[in-house]
Amino acid sequence: MPSFKHTVKHALLSLTLLSVSAAAFAAGEPIKAVTDATFPPMEFTENQKMVGFDIELTEAIAHKLGRSVQWTNVDFKGLIPSLTAGRADIAVSAIYITPERQKVVNFTQPYMAGGLVTLVKEGNDRIKTADDLKGKKVSVQTGTKSVEWLHTHIPEAQTVEVEKNQQMFNLLSIGRVDAAVTGKPAAFQYARTRGGVKILPGSLTSEEYGIAVRKDETSLVTEINTALEQMKAEGSYQQLVDKWFPGSSK
């Protein structure tokens, strides 16, 4: 009959092996990520596939963690609720780090500087500064920082909220609104690829993008931060920046 000491030792060994196996399994599980793939060049759909800076950055980080990414495309306003409801582990969609959002989700270290800018049609000389938005129709995407900023700083503006980023740009291009307020990357991408619009000088805000992580996934924040630092050190992060933002000094 095995001794008590032997039995305890065997039990401890079994528990250790189970713990290691569980950890190894967890490490290999796909990371459930949500994004709103309507914000080029950060995330958008091309040939029925999600592409963009955020997409490639997230998948490169996951590769370093020995995991894959399971993407789900949702409206921007549904990103944070997807985390709080436990349907996703992370949200990556050019999300600004704000005190309000930090109350319900955790954020990784910032991975890119953003900020809100104003777009108007080429030839529009009536709107030169943010103050000129008073009384004007301004398109914004529902659930974004743009809505809050306008309501707080230019309450006289007539905000026209739409679900998709492309709808916001389209309303400006066809003259249904006087201006659009959105994040810097998408604004410059649209102005560069579509034309017919111009970006007013200066940013309305100066904020940073972070990867939002479910509150109970505290270790994942540390793991992502470590992987991000490794990418910056080895130069692969800058390669992604150069690919999606050619000529950028960031």
Image (cartoon, helix red, strand yellow):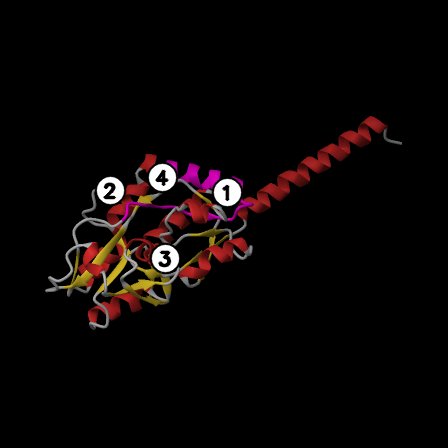
At x 41%, y 52%, the residue is 92
Foreground residue among 79 and 248: 79
Label 4 or label 1, whichever lies nearer to me, is: 1
Question: Which class describes the residues within 10 Å of circle 3: few (<14), some (14-19), or many (20+)?
Answer: some
For marks 2 and 3, give the CA distance. Answer: 23 Å
Q: Mark 4 vs mark 3: which is more N-terminal? A: 3
Res. 141 image quadrant: bottom left
The residue beneath circle 3 is 144
The residue beneath circle 2 is 250
Q: Are marks 4 and 1 in contact (CB under 8 Å)?
A: no
Residue 32 placement (x, y as % from top left)? 50, 54
Q: Mark 3 vs mark 1: which is more N-terminal? A: 3
Tell me if residue 175 is in the magenta stretch: no
Amino acid of disc 1: Leu
Amino acid of disc 3: Thr
Question: Which class describes the residues within 10 Å of circle 1: few (<14), some (14-19), or many (20+)?
Answer: some
Amino acid of disc 2: Lys
Foreground residue among 233 and 79: 79
